[in-house]
């Protein structure tokens, strides 16, 4: 059964059956995420939080040596690279040896992804991502890496007072019902993880009372999701002069850069700390905020280098990551595409333990004529081929332009699919134009913005530019 057919069956089903389907899918994910060697990985992550610098170096140096040996023996791209450079695994006995390799850019990976696949290894799953520039990538991931990523999130939530299995309200990118359907309920329940999946596509002034009542009834211990969606929810509480009838222990944000004003409004409304974490679709880097708000880099998943960026000042560094676990499609010294703010630029090591801030995706939102704010729209690009970069610009209340830089092998049908994907998420309320361009300019701060709302207020625009 194709994904499109599954979606049509789901959309055409009554709510009670949709809840069953969501839970069935949830139980399938539960088995993939939390069985087999998962508990061993979780315990390792718990212990790694307390490793000192020597323990981190010992672990990472050994795993790096093993990964380089694997790449030299089994991965075509690295076989050619090591032969060209005259290097073997014996040249990598400490993390300081990493700069012997050149930095890997996304363009190289995108141009020949099959050459990064290890011979004879079948992936446990394929991760599709649009990247921070709307550029689709398909990444092969082994089971250990996938389950380690799950263990990292579980341990992060535990550290901030949310035990595994606690009631969790999620505000992310799942389409729990078609955007054009304005009849509640606007959430579905995943019994496998005690998780209520709230739609981020239906919240407006008219629907907010339903969200408020549903959250009070569910009594979540945690809110988790996109900072833009949770901040929008918090704004509705403030605008209506109401308070939540539940007390979460933490709000966990991810997938977008958490802006200062978003943190302020969320913490003010929900009366608990906001803890942000940063992860990559390549499963090579995970960093979660500690109790002081610093982003602690997890040493088990990969090695992170923070390379000072001379073009943006001494306090900013480019993030480069090396996987220590994903033998199926290993990436060594991979340029993530995001930057970080260093703690003490003059003394910061190239392979730091913590970062002051990570500057990831900085997106605006699209607003429908009925007041729904739709953030994090990278889902519309996933699975599409032939698109090098893309950007959504809302230039009128009822119109968006999708700017795309296309590759020579683009199938025109992909652009129609792209247009349909955005239409579904905006309830068909916006006219959409797809415009092919040679390049997409960066903002004043040099960062790519995947979504720009030209109707934003001066305060919102300023916050985006300064992030």
Image (cartoon, helix red, strand yellow):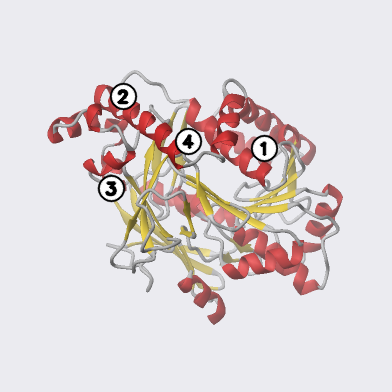
> Which residue corresponds to mark 2?
70
Upstream in sequence: badge 4 or badge 3: 3
**Other-residue count near label 3 (Cα within 10 Å), few / some / many at <14 / 14–19 / ≥20:** few
Circle nearer the N terminus (2, 4):
2
Q: Mark 2 or mark 1: name the one nearer the start of the chain.
A: 1
Q: Would you identify the image quadrant in which residue 205 lies? A: bottom right
Q: 10 and 245: which one is in front?
A: 245
Residue denoted by label 1: 10
Q: Could you say whether the residue bearing mark 1 is in a helix, strand or loop?
A: helix
Report the Cα–Cα distance between label 4 and label 3.
27 Å
Residue 207 visible from this viewpoint? no
Tell me the residue that label 4 is attached to: 300
Judging by the rendered image, the residue that carries numbered circle 3 is: 107
Mark 2 or 4, which is nearer the eye? 4
Q: Is residue 95 above or below residue 215?
A: above
Q: Earlier in the sequence, mark 1 or mark 4?
A: 1
Q: Nearer the viewer, residue 136 or 276?
A: 276
Q: Residues within 10 Å of mark 4 (few under 14, many from 20)?
A: many
Q: From mark 1 to mark 4, how far is it between C-alphas?
A: 38 Å
Spot occupied by residue 12 in the image (x, y as percentages of width and height): 69, 40
Evaluate if marks 1 and 4 touch, with contact meaning CB atoms under 8 Å apart.
Answer: no
- Of tags 2 and 1, the one toward the viewer is 2
Check whether the beta carbons of the residues at disc 4 and disc 3 lie within 8 A of each other. Answer: no
Q: Residue at x 68, y 41 (%)?
A: 158
Q: Nearer the viewer, mark 2 or mark 3?
A: 2
Mark pair 2, 3: CA separation: 23 Å
Residue 354 lies, in percent from the top left, at 48, 52
Element at badge 2?
helix
Q: Which mark is residue 60?
A: none
Q: In the figure, is residue 306 to the left or right of 425?
A: left
């Amino acid at each position: 059964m194709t994904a499109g057919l599954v979606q049509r069956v789901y959309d055409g089903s009554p709510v009670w059956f949709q809840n069953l389907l969501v839970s069935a899918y949830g139980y399938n994910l539960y088995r993939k995420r939390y069985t087999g060697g998962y508990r061993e990985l979780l315990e390792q992550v718990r212990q790694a939080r307390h490793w000192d610098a020597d323990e981190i170096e010992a672990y990472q140096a050994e795993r790096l040596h093993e990964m380089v040996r694997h790449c030299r023996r089994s991965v075509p791209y690295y076989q050619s690279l090591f032969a060209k450079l005259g290097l073997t695994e014996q040249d990598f006995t400490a993390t300081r040896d990493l700069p012997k390799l050149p930095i890997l850019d996304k363009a190289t990976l995108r141009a020949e992804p099959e050459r990064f696949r290890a011979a004879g290894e079948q992936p446990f799953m394929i991760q599709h991502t649009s990247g921070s520039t709307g550029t689709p990538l398909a990444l092969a991931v082994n089971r250990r890496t996938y389950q380690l990523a799950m263990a990292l999130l579980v341990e992060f939530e535990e550290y901030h007072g949310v035990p595994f299995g606690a009631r969790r309200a999620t505000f992310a990118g799942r389409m729990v019902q078609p955007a054009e359907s304005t009849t509640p309920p606007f959430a579905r329940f995943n019994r496998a993880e005690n998780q209520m999946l709230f739609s981020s596509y239906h919240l407006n002034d008219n629907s907010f009372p339903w969200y408020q009542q549903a959250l009070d009834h569910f009594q979540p211990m945690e809110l988790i999701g996109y900072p833009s969606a949770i901040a929008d929810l918090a704004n509705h509480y403030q605008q209506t002069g109401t308070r939540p009838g539940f007390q979460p222990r933490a709000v966990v944000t991810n997938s977008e850069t958490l802006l200062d004003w978003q943190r302020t409004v969320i913490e003010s409304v929900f009366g608990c700390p906001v803890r942000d974490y940063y992860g990559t679709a390549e499963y090579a880097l995970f960093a979660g905020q500690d109790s002081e708000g610093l982003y602690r880099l997890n040493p088990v998943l990969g090695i992170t280098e923070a390379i000072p960026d001379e073009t943006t000042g001494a306090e900013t560094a480019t993030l480069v990551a090396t996987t220590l676990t994903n033998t199926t499609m290993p990436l060594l010294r991979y340029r993530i595409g995001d930057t970080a703010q260093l703690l003490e630029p003059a003394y910061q090591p190239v392979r730091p333990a913590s970062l002051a801030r990570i500057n990831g995706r900085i997106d605006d939102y699209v607003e429908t004529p009925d007041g729904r704010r739709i953030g994090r729209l990278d889902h519309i690009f996933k699975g599409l081929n032939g698109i090098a970069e893309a950007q959504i610009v809302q230039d009128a209340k009822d119109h968006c332009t999708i700017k795309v830089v296309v590759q020579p092998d683009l199938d025109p049908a992909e652009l129609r699919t792209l247009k349909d994907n955005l239409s579904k998420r905006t309830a068909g309320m916006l006219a959409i134009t797809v415009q092919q361009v040679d390049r997409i300019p960066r903002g004043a701060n040099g960062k790519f913005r995947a979504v720009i709302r030209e109707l934003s207020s001066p305060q919102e625009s300023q916050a985006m530019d300064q992030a």
